[in-house]
Amino acid sequence: MGGSEGGSLAVLTGAGISAESGIATFRGMGGLWNDVPIEEVATPRGFAKDPKRVWEFYEARRRQAGSCRPNAGHAGLARLEEILGPERFTLITQNVDGLHFLAGSKNVLEVHGSLWQVRCTGCGVEREDRTVPFEALPPRCDCGSMLRPAVVWFGEYLPEGVFERAVAAAEACALFLVVGTSAQVEPAASLARIASRAGAEVWEVNPEETPLSAISDRSWRSGAGEVMGEVVLAARSLLGC
Ligand code: OAD
């Protein structure tokens, strides 16, 4: 494995890494999308039809995420960034809960946006907002227009420039680590294939098999928090750090 020494690490995380912190995943048992129709709460059409309903859903998610703490999975990735430095480490997350930042990660690409950012539907201004609960729903911008959560809904583009940076990290890395995603949502899922085609090793941490298992060189069929210590050691050995 000497060829990977000095190489960089790109990580893709999904809802599964926050499961041990108490945040519900989207699919599978107890998944959010089993109880809530996606079209109603996570599409531009749903928001146009009933913004209050959409905000009630996101306010509940903000309340939940705000009461949860990062777990050993998040902490292990923050430690790897500390060891490798920002030039050799990119964390690409589909999660909107902000727990990677709370764990101390810095070089984080939130490809699906953040629960803690709001964007004005009128003037377009985007800013951090941690209010829970708002006085009235939907909340309004200073300009008078409705605010929306700055998350990516189905049918929308990813935040400008962010995905391009994720692709660049996938193409350049020696190791691509996939943690806690069912790999069913594009384009995030394709990042591991891009990395694999470019010659990176792909490792997966997930209690279940996913469409990426077939291209993974190594798999841990466990919860991220349980095995992250071992994964960190293996990554350090591969990357020589
Ligand atoms: P999913 O809910 O689709 O998948 C969660 C994955 O985590 C599953 O494969 C589980 O097996 C795995 N998992 C469960 N517990 C775990 C644990 N303790 N450690 C590691 N893995 C565990 O969530 P995502 O793949 O993140 O997008 O979903 C992708 C996107 O679909 C989300 O960002 C969201 C959703 O619709 C938007 O809202 C745009």
Image: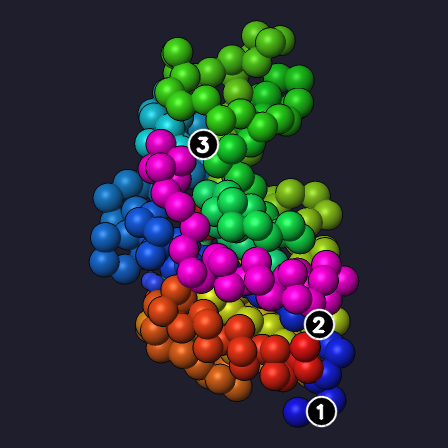
Q: Which residue is at 56% across, 42% downward?
A: 113
In magenta, the rendered stretch is 63-90
Pick the quarter of the image with the N terminus. bottom right
Q: Amino acid at mark 3?
A: Arg
Q: Residue at x 40, y 35 (%)?
A: 66
- Name the mark nearer the viewer: 1 or 3: 1
Taking 231 as reference, is 143 left or right?
right
Residue at position x 49%, y 75% from top? Answer: 231
Amino acid under disc 2: Ser
Q: Which residue is mark 2?
A: 8
Q: Residue furthest bottom?
A: 1
Res 75 seen here: yes
Q: Which mark is residue 45?
A: 3
Q: Which of disc 2 and disc 3 is earlier in sequence? A: 2
Callout 1: SS: helix
Q: CA distance from mark 3 to mark 2?
A: 40 Å
* Residue type at the position of mark 1: Gly
Mark 1 or mark 2, which has the lower sequence index?
A: 1
